[in-house]
Amino acid sequence: MENFSSNCGTNVTVNLSSRTCSAVQVTSGQPELISYFQSLIIVTVNRVAINTVLGMTGVASNVINMCVFLKQGLHVSMNVNFFVLATVDLLRTINYLWMTVCSNPEIETLDAPFIFQDIQYLTNGWISGSLERVTIFIIAFMTVQRCFSILKPLSIKRMITPVRSVIVLLVIFLINGVVVIPGCISIYFDYRFYPSKNRTLLGLAFLSSSAENEGIAFAMHAVLYVVSLSVLIIFTLLLVLQMEQQTKWRRVTLMKNQQQALSKRNKKTSKLVSLLAIFLIVLCTPTVIVSIASTFVPDFSVSGKQVNLFFAVWSFAYVFGALNANVNIFIYYNMSSKYRQVFQEMFSLCCDQSNTQS
């Protein structure tokens, strides 16, 4: 809920879930670009229908990824990175499923002591953004690590050990967790009276500095997105160039049959890295754009005049985020022979056990 006295000239308390301030803003000569009902349809389709499917498949695929990399062993630094990446994507998809529950229009008909949409904004929105940034940072770190493995192949295992990888990953979590603080310190849960329900319920409340703090949070949010994606793009290009140079050099020094095997391995590695980077960049770019818009357009926020547009556009960003948490399993299976071998062993074992029990 929020006090809109500065915008509407009167002291109006607004429920975030119903976003009734749009009516107030229309009468003040500043109508929203889309209506509440248009926003509701878009949000329902994206958050409830599409994200439910992507959330369920994302949970299944990332649990499989975690099992595969755990079976391969976490004594290798890259396996630690892949395992943590799958864990983060699993948390993201679970978070998306919680969002689909809160975004269901029928959920407000329940006799709950709180407003689901208000609870969802604080417990889901910022967490989803942070986890998505963590994903980008992890893949960027993996790309940097692969670059060093080519530049210093003999010392890379001493430079980046599993323990050091864990430390780097913890720092990544810490940095991305700090970003949500400005956006949350002026937003809190409080009991308010809702005339439409004739009840006192738990919902969002905003301090007077909420707009400024939210702007700072979105600015930090956008900066981290841009920095992490830039690092990922630069080191991916560098990695591809390094592998091409290594391939040309080794073709001169190795036997013909070794040349063919090495060339094939390098091409697979290059394609794997390129696909991870391309999918990540494409699917995260909408979120970066929306974050920048939320930073520089004050009306485009949860407490701004374009709140309906804000929720509608962000629902598309969540769809891209949920899709991103689903694609890795297909890339791993098609590009990594080790992953495919363990995957097939796991499922053949499961099939054998089920046949034995039957």
Image (cartoon, rainbow, N blue to C red):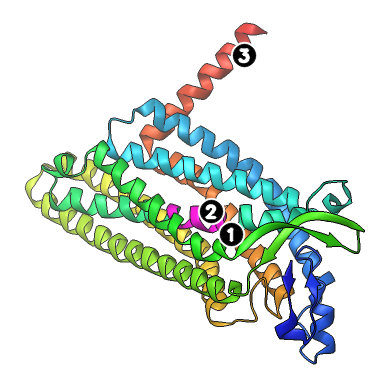
Indicate yes or no whether the magenta region holds residue 128. yes
For disc 2, the marked residue is 324
Q: Residue, x 50% and y 65% (percent of image)?
A: 182
**Quarter residue 234 falls in:** bottom left
- Kindly give the residue lying farthest to the left in the view shown: 253
Q: Are marks 2 and 1 in contact (CB under 8 Å)?
A: yes
Q: Nearer the viewer, residue 167 or 281?
A: 167
Q: Secondary structure at mark 1?
A: helix
Amino acid marked by disc 3: Ser
Quadrant containing the N terminus is bottom right
Foreground tag (3 vs 2): 2
Q: Is residue 239 above or below residue 160?
A: below
Give left or right: position of 250 versus 211.
left
Question: In the rendered image, which residue does mark 1 sit on?
Answer: 320
The mark lying in front, picked from 3 and 1, is: 1
Determine the residue positioned at 68% across, 78% down.
Answer: 304
Label 3: which residue?
354
In the image, residue 188 lies at what x, y percent?
64, 59
Mark 3 Cα within 10 Å, few/some/many (few <14, many 20+)? Answer: few
Residue 141, above or below 156:
below
The residues tagged by marks 3 and 1 sit, at their Cα atoms, a distance apart of 36 Å
Marks 3 and 2 close (CB-CB < 8 Å):
no
Where residue 126 appears, x then y in whole percent? 56, 58
Q: Nearer the viewer, residue 272 or 224?
A: 224
